[in-house]
Image (cartoon, rainbow, N blue to C red):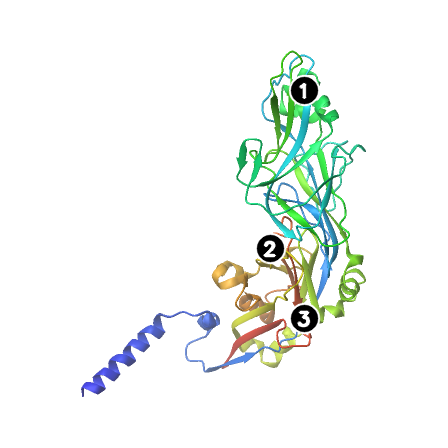
Amino acid sequence: MARRLATLFAASLLLIAASCSKTTENVGNGLLPEGDHFGVYYTDTLHIECHSQIIDSMATKGMTTALLGSIVDPDLGRTTANLFTQLRLSATNQHFGNNPSIDSVVLQLGVIGYFGDTTTPQTLHVYELADSLRYETEYYQFSDIAAKPVDLANGYTFLPHPKTNSVVGNDTLSQAVIRIPLDHSLGVLLATADSSVYRSQQAFKNFFPGLKVSCEDATQNGSISYLLPTSNSLTKLELYYHEADNDIAMRYDYYITTDDSYFNQYLHDYSLGSDNFVQQVVEGDTALGQQILYLQSMGGVRALLRFPNIETWGDTLQHEHLIINEAKLVLPISRTDAPGYATVASLALLSLNADGSTTVLPDYFEGSAYYGGSYSSSTRSVTFRISEYLQDLVSGKSQSQGLYLSITGAAYNAYRCIIPGPEFSGENVIKCNIKYSIIGE
């Protein structure tokens, strides 16, 4: 008798636990009418068509992180990141005294990180802009602003070694910095300007449109530096001077803030990429995407994924009786031996509408813990749940033309990744794992 009571008690606990547990595998079960009989099935053979393509337009204005440098990727070719920016007065009504003497001019850029081989020397050039930037204008990865021909940095070459801090004079800064010495002529221009130039921010911008900071194209390896453009304690133009009648060293700073216009320009030479990449992305052989997919930040490369047989699959199973309990899009990430290439942190997935616009998937609103998108180091993959998206396709509720897959934050980071396509030789390939049910009529 005691054994029977113990058994009944244990069974009751299991029943309570089952009734209180809501798993992602049962997402579609709430749609089932009471009394219907159904089975749960599984497939990972849904056909996926995919290929990589160049991103035609990506806004790069006003990002919290700016990029600078040049890198030669063994698979994707060369990318060079340049920076265009306005400058802002640290204080208005500045007066440099009578006949100021320029000691030095330094452009200091705060650095928060790197991508690539930081042992490769980089050469920077700095130019005064010839045309103005406009705060109300959007700028993209391909945008360009005319600059004057004189290189104020005189081809400054440095090694972008990672550091946790920097020492400048007697000050220890919280981050690494790049300090670019500029020609004294810039200091003379700024210090001898009419006093009206320093009466307002706009007056100064009208007088001095800003700077272009560019990097010489790398011939091998190379790296991209992550900058902190609006950190006024780190990133600034420093003008060191003294007045003619005394030897007291003085300094005046010019800043970049969120109220100023700045953007990244990304220049790609994809002809230097691997044969498969060039044929697929540059020459348009989309069939090669079934073998390998490429993704690149810096306004570079994304992938288009489609499920061309989804309607046929639904018709075969009588789509009006088909419930998708769970669909996981699994994207294995290939490793690279290139030095300093950090693994992508997360990917983004958008639905392509018939008019060319994009929207987030309905599954996105279930929350990031359910939806996914982050890289898993244990499986070396990224997984998205796209159950509702596929259900809408099967039922005819959605007219989505496919999915755009890209790197999250592709406008302001330097990640790249390679994904084995669905027909790649090997077990670890793109696939969609689907659990579904067929309900009775």
Image vertical order of residue 246 relative to residue 152, above or below:
above
Instruction: Please tell me which residue lies in front, 257 or 391.
Output: 257
Say which mark, if any, is on residue 247. Answer: none
Estimate the x, y position of residue 96 in percent, counting from the top left. 64, 17
Res. 85 in view:
yes
Q: Are marks 1 and 2 in contact (CB under 8 Å)?
A: no
- Residue 273 sits in which quadrant? bottom right
Label 1: how many Cα within 10 Å (few below 14, some 14–19, many 20+): some
Estimate the x, y position of residue 54 in percent, counting from the top left. 73, 57
Say which mark, if any, is on residue 421. Answer: 3
Say which mark, if any, is on residue 408. Answer: 2
Image vertical order of residue 336 relative to residue 172, above or below:
below
Image vertical order of residue 230 relative to residue 70, above or below:
above
Element marked by disc 3: loop
Estimate the x, y position of residue 75 in percent, counting from the top left. 73, 61
At label 2, the amino acid type is: Thr
Instruction: Please tell me which residue lies in front, 349 or 3.
Output: 3
At label 1, the amino acid type is: Val
The mark that comes first in sequence, 3 or 1, is: 1
- Residue 6 sits in which quadrant? bottom left
Q: Are marks 3 and 1 in contact (CB under 8 Å)?
A: no
